[in-house]
Amino acid sequence: MILIGQYDSPFVRRVGLALTLYDMPFDHRPWSAFGDADMIRPYNPLMRVPTLVLDDSIALTDSHVILGHLDGLMPPDRVLMPRDAAARVRAARIIGLACGAADAAVSLFYELRLHEAASEALAGRRRTQIAGAFVALQDEVAGASGDHLFEGRVGHADIAVAVAWRFLAEAHPGLLPATDFPQVAAHAARLEASAPFQAICQPFVPPA
């Protein structure tokens, strides 16, 4: 398999982490959706990342779609979601909040960076969305009984929270102080210190 995209994207990174934790070999093409769009187009006409090119040359896009496919390849006891039905719903909520916050953070960055005059209405809405999501995530993480959110092991929910927090901290430093979200910050720091997170990692590089 080939994973296309840079690891400073929280969405590319969550796919790379899942592939790593699932022990699925893959080649990484760290192409930018901006600077390398022409290289991505033959695989994905949307020119978006992440793009995962499967061994049969079918290319999947969107991290949720990709991870759903990868989960389906794994035995049930290895899938990075809780096995209990109620816990799976909670995990899905956490993933949705974290990925929604990451998406809003990406949108906010582009609004502030790419437009000559940023829309304060849109920027303000994005900031409100990000803050609201992390307030909810802080409550979820604070209620966890151990170092991981479910079943005492790293899962998609843990990954989503950590990669969203790192992207926010690097793309919008100071927007949400870590002192206001201590459990989220500590949770992310524990994961960032682990071998998979150290391997699947890249400092944020603003698009040219």
Image (cartoon, rainbow, N blue to C red):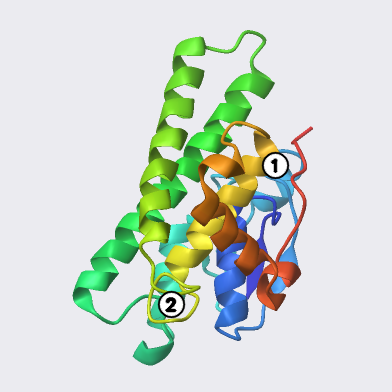
The image quarter containing residue 106 is top right
Disc 1: which residue: 170
Residue closer to the observer: 47 or 141? 141
Q: Is residue 90 visible?
A: yes
Give residue 207's position: percent from left, percent from top: 74, 36
Give the residue type at disc 2.
Answer: Leu
Q: Earlier in the sequence, mark 2 or mark 1?
A: 2
Image quadrant where residue 85 sits? bottom left
Q: Which mark is residue 80?
A: 2
Q: Residue at x 55, y 73 (%)?
A: 18
Discs 2/1, front: 1
Q: What residue is drawn where x is 64% and y is 61%? A: 189
Q: Mark on residue 6?
A: none
Q: Is residue 49 visible?
A: no
108 shown above or below 93: above
Q: Residues within 10 Å of mark 1 (few under 14, many from 20)?
A: some
Q: For mark 1, give the secondary structure.
A: helix
100 on left or right of 39: left
Q: Residue 22 at what x, y percent from top left? A: 55, 83
Quadrant in the picture for the N terminus: bottom right
Relative vertical location of residue 58 with respect to residue 163 in this rendering, above or below: below
Residue flagged by tag 1: what amino acid is it? Glu
Residue 87, located in which quarter of the rendered image?
bottom left
Local crowd size for mark 2, using a 10 Å CA cut-off: few (<14), some (14–19), many (≥20): many
Residue drawn at x 56%, y 65% is 15
Question: In x, y percent, where is residue 172?
Answer: 65, 33
